[in-house]
Image: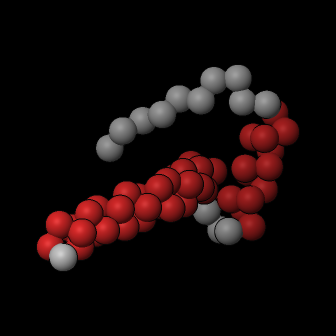
Amino acid sequence: MANVLVRNLPPEVHRALKVRAALNDRSTDAEIREILAAAVQPLELDVIGREVGYLFIERY
């Protein structure tokens, strides 16, 4: 699994992440992973949808 280092994260952002993680009963690391996964999900769906569209156009 890959690692990511975030430099110069403002203290208020770090605090907000810790609070959000606690509210979701997760570790801060787990919360950040969830946020990142959710952030790229629409992009992946868009790419998949575009590929399905291309396949449809090629066939019909």
Whether residue 6 appears in this view of the structure is: yes
Asked if 1 appears above or below 35 in the picture, the reply is: above
In which quadrant is the N terminus drawn? Answer: top left
Q: How is the image coloured?
A: secondary structure
Q: How many callouts does the rendering have? A: 0
Asked if 2 appears above or below 37 in the picture, the reply is: above
Q: In this view of the protein, which residue sits in the foreground, 44 or 5?
A: 44
Q: Residue furthest bottom?
A: 60
Q: In this view of the protein, which residue sits in the foreground, 10 or 37?
A: 37
Q: In this view of the protein, which residue sits in the foreground, 58 or 40?
A: 58
Q: Residue 35 appears at what percent x and percent y?
A: 59, 55
Q: Quadrant of residue 38?
A: bottom right
Q: Quadrant of residue 11?
A: top right
Q: Residue furthest left?
A: 59
Q: Is residue 31 left or right of residue 10?
A: left
In which quadrant is the C terminus drawn? Answer: bottom left
Q: Residue furthest front?
A: 60
Q: Residue 28 appears at what percent x and percent y?
A: 63, 51
Q: Quadrant of residue 2?
A: top left
Asked if 16 appears above or below 49 in the picture, the reply is: above
Q: Residue 7 appears at what percent x and percent y?
A: 63, 24
Q: Residue at x 17, y 66 (%)?
A: 58
Q: Residue at x 68, y 68 (%)?
A: 24
Whether residue 37 appears in this view of the structure is: no
Q: Residue at x 79, y 31 (%)?
A: 10
Q: Is residue 43 left or right of residue 13?
A: left
Q: Residue 36 appears at what percent x and percent y?
A: 54, 51
Q: Is residue 9 left or right of residue 29?
A: right
Q: Residue furthest right?
A: 12
Asked if 53 appears above or below 34 in the picture, the reply is: below
